[in-house]
Amino acid sequence: MKTINLMKVVACAFLLSTEAGAQTIYDAAKFSGSDLNGTARFVGMGGAMGALGGDISTMGSNPAGIGIYRSNDLMTSFGFNYTSSKSNFNGSIMNSDKYRGSFDNIGFVYSSKVGNQTALKYVNFGFNYHKAASFDRDFSMGGNLNGFSQTDEMSNMSNSTQYRSALTASDMSRDNLGVDANAGWLPILGWNGSLIHPNLDLNTPGEYTGFPGNDPSGSYTSRERGGIDVYDFNVSFNINDRVYLGFTLGAYDLNYRKDIYYGEKFPTSYNPLDKDKNELPYFLANSDYSYSLESFMNTTGTGVDFKLGGIFRPVEDSPLRIGATIHTPTFYNLTMYNSAVLTSNADVNKDGYIIRYVDTDPKYKSYYIDTYEDMHNRDCMTEYQLRTPWKYNLSLGYTIGRNVALGAEYEYQDYSTAKLSYSDGVKMYDENSMINSYLKGVSTLRLGAEIKLVPEFAIRAGYNYRSTAFSNDAYKELPVNSVRTDTDYANQQSISNYTLGLGYRTGSFYADIAYQYSAYKEDFYAFNILNLEKTKVNNDKQQVLLTLGFRF
């Protein structure tokens, strides 16, 4: 394969005028969510410890849980993770898996006794670092597209809309690559790669259609890395051993990298019509056309939120506890860098029509557009703000002597209220309208139990369920001048997490281990074209988590 590098352009000016074209509902949903993670005890009980308290991980769920402490605590957790995905597109099945180690949290609690004669018994302070979400995942799919093509989305983004006329060849020329704000990166690359061409229909002059291949097949692979790290700072209070109040300030560090390879192959046959009669605007050789589009995106940023929680014992002599928590939105300031490379063996004649001859040696041409060129130059960034939804939590805890602890929680977060803004704080109208229409409220149920067989050993089990954030008809729409070339999207369905755990205590030392199995399905689409068959995906995650700590 011969590769000719024809274009390498830094697109600073284009980015400055098109920040609105960079974000989608799928970014808002991904960055608003969190995994079941924390200490092994917390995970082993399915995260249902909001009303029970007494565990460092409750700092991030119900801050009042730290008020239960009557001694100091120092601990750390790490784990081993396995993720797998199985895709099924029209009977074509592909499997992907990923193994990784993880450092999951480290923290401490300093417990300060105020006195026995005052209503305020303890004032406790805590810090905890934990990984709120992991984005690590490998995925692949492919198969016959039944006549659909990503080039159709390229042409759709080139055609007229209610806001503007169809793009011109000048808009999408190589000379304007990354500069003309009228055209998005996807149609620019498609045009220069000879994958879209003028429509022959005289009723729609100036419009474009996708590549004229027959029965194309597609191949998609992605590599996602990164996560959301949270640093929680807590203060909590014990009032008369019946009322516990807590406040947590959370500092967030987000890093997300996604690399995508998508390619299509168009089996073709030679058309014998005489090209000189101009009966067809293109001629298909008896060798195959193909192209590949590589998209690279990296989003980084920081955020902050506040959590207020309480635990109450309504009856003095009863072990029943009731917990309530409210989490403010996380206020993110985010920066996105992206680049793309399109390689194609199609070519055009002087009239702009796709053409290849039988005796032409295939030559692959590459078109490259980049914002990584100078990642420290502020003019080469897409900066924006994200405000995640408010979060509300109610929990129950019940103990039987010193041997049994039971917990239950319900949490609600309305994803449709997430908001995207420009870097200056002005709301993104179109993107927020999509969020309001296609995201919805998410309910999370957590159940957990701990039983101490003997004072030193405990066994735990839990269940954690989270409903989907996406409506059935959700889709990804790239604005016509978008800097994004990642056309793929997936509508994730509900997630179920099943957990088991063991705990050991001796003196001041403790060790806990937990196992978590997570399963969910999703409907995946490599690009946004009406009636494209969905790829059915089954996802599984297994985690083994170990926590070591001292209480003193």
Image: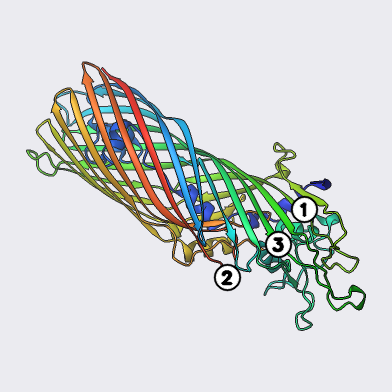
Viewer-proximal residue among 9 and 391: 9
Could you say which disc has been placed on residue 266 in the image?
3
Q: Amino acid at mark 2?
A: Leu
Q: Amino acid at mark 1?
A: Gly
In the rendered image, the residue lying farthest to the right is 276
Could you say which disc has been placed on residue 178 in the image?
1
Whether pointer 1 and pointer 3 mark residues with C-beta atoms closer than 8 Å, the reply is no
In the rendered image, the residue lying farthest to the left is 317
Judged by depth in the image, the label closer to the viewer, 2 or 1, is: 2
Viewer-proximal residue among 176 and 530: 530
Query: Under tag 1, what secondary structure?
Result: loop
Q: Earlier in the sequence, mark 2 or mark 1?
A: 1
Query: Under tag 2, what secondary structure?
Result: loop
Left or right side of 1 for 327: left
Q: Is residue 395 above or below residue 272?
A: above
Q: Amino acid at mark 3?
A: Phe
In terms of image quadrants, where is residue 71?
A: top left
- Residue 43 locus on image (x, y percent): 31, 37
Viewer-proximal residue among 447 and 269: 269
- Residue 321 locus on image (x, y percent): 17, 42
Could you say which disc has been placed on residue 530 in the image?
2
Neighbours of disc 1 within 10 Å: few (<14), some (14-19), many (20+)? many
Left or right side of 70 for 536: right
Query: Under tag 3, what secondary structure?
Result: strand
Is any atom of residue 130 visible in this view? no
The Cα–Cα distance between marks 1 and 3, rounded to whole angstroms, is: 28 Å
